Amino acid sequence: MAVVHAGVLSNIVQYVSSSHDVLSLLDALPRDALDTPLRTLQTLVSPPVAAPWPHLCVDDLDCQHTLTLLAALSTFCSVSIENLYKLTEVLRDASSEPESDALCAATIDFARKWGHKVTHIAAWWWPEEYTADTIATIIRHCTGLNSITHAKRIVYASSILQDVYDCGDWRHVFGDWLASAHATELRLDNIMCEDSVGFARAIAAATSLTSLKLTNAPVLLQGLVEAGVVLQYITQLRLVVDHSDSIFADALVSNGVNLPALRVLKLRSEDDADMTFVLRLLPYLVALERRRRRGTCDEDDDVCLDLFAWAERSPCLEVVNVDAIDVVWRKPVLFGRQLRRWIQSGVDRVSLEDCDVDDMSITAIAGSLCDARRSRPFVLYFRGKPLRLRWYYMLIEALATSTGVSIEGNDFSHADDRHDMENWATRFDLRLHRGGHNRFTIHSPV
């Protein structure tokens, strides 16, 4: 029997939707009627390998199957690379010249041959000696991406903790992408570059870019300030800075952002930098959808309560995260009243994370739930520090009088405690649901 040509049968195979059907099709043909790509495909989709079909993550298989995979790639519709560094190591080990002076020669050869099938690339860790130019070379061969300009989101991070990694000329990776009208989200972590002012202007000019996160990127942060540009299209801004960079964070947020358009603003300090400048900007942050307060800033209880009251007035606010704030137990009555107002004003979720509580604060929280009426669901989420069993009874008793309200929390490790929770839920006609990560949710009767 003549050998089945891969160009014919491979095209047919690519329209088959499951690996089981592919295997059935190939098994129906004599093995000597299949050419090398189809025989290796048969091996890949058979146990114990059982590779996914029709889209394959090329770095997801065991190294022992690398050569088999490479021989079968012509039969796959598309492939993705979830860890470019891992793929580089695997291909170099499988290469006939593993000691090649070009550290990424095998990966570049792979991209040159199979780049038209690559639809996704992620490089979560990329050693400095491989350089950003190497990534750019690989990407240029991956025409299946329709070039990087058709990606919507780029996360570019360095694992060098002692210093900021200089990625060189930013235009190699980001220039065309920012100007493509496809870019929507950019995250830079532990990175610096040449001509940070030019990079800043390109970011500001990207009309499609709506989300920006800078983590320990002081040179670019300073470049955004020195460029004197306004990030008028950015609606989500996240900054992680240290003490020495807080002055640039202040200048950027105060003068370089369209504050009324911001839906998300997240500021975090690595070393207790002063972020209180955001307080004077609160009247302009009218579109925020989330309000998060962390206990890392030296604010007294009255300032926290004022912030909470401001959050209540935000017309777009949906989520409030209260993280390690002492006002929850130091001023329980006032916090309970504030929680009640959040429930009434339309906030959908309040999360208390690692907040100290006691009998008085739980009593105040339970009081805020009593007779609460919601047309759309409201969730009170306890995260971090576990609550005592009797405190949950107080909350469940209050929950029984409410409508459209739920409580989420950490489940108990002892069977007797879990049994008590189930009995209380049944007694008060509540719905108890246990989910993953050792969590539970209790819903009000209606």
Image (cartoon, rainbow, N blue to C red):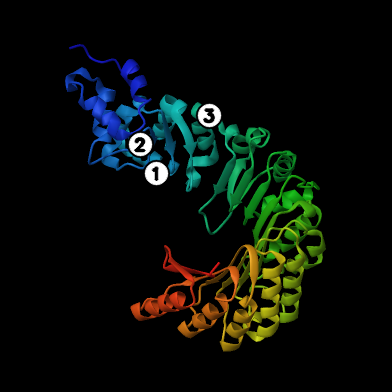
Residue at image location 37% in from the left, 20% down from the top: 11
Circle 1 packing at 10 Å, graded few (<14), some (14-19), many (20+), is: some
Q: In this orientation, which residue lies closer to the viewer: 331 or 111?
A: 331
> Split into 4 quadrants, where in the image is the N terminus?
top left
Q: SS of the residue at dot 1?
A: helix
Circle 2 packing at 10 Å, graded few (<14), some (14-19), many (20+), is: many
| Residue where numbered disc 2 is placed | 91
| Residue where numbered disc 3 is placed | 140
Mark 3 residue type: Arg
Residue at image location 78% in from the left, 58% down from the top: 286
| Residue where numbered disc 1 is placed | 86
Q: CA distance from mark 1 to mark 3?
A: 19 Å
Q: CA distance from mark 2 to mark 3?
A: 19 Å
Q: CA distance from mark 2 to mark 1?
A: 9 Å
Mark 2 residue type: Leu
Q: SS of the residue at dot 3?
A: helix
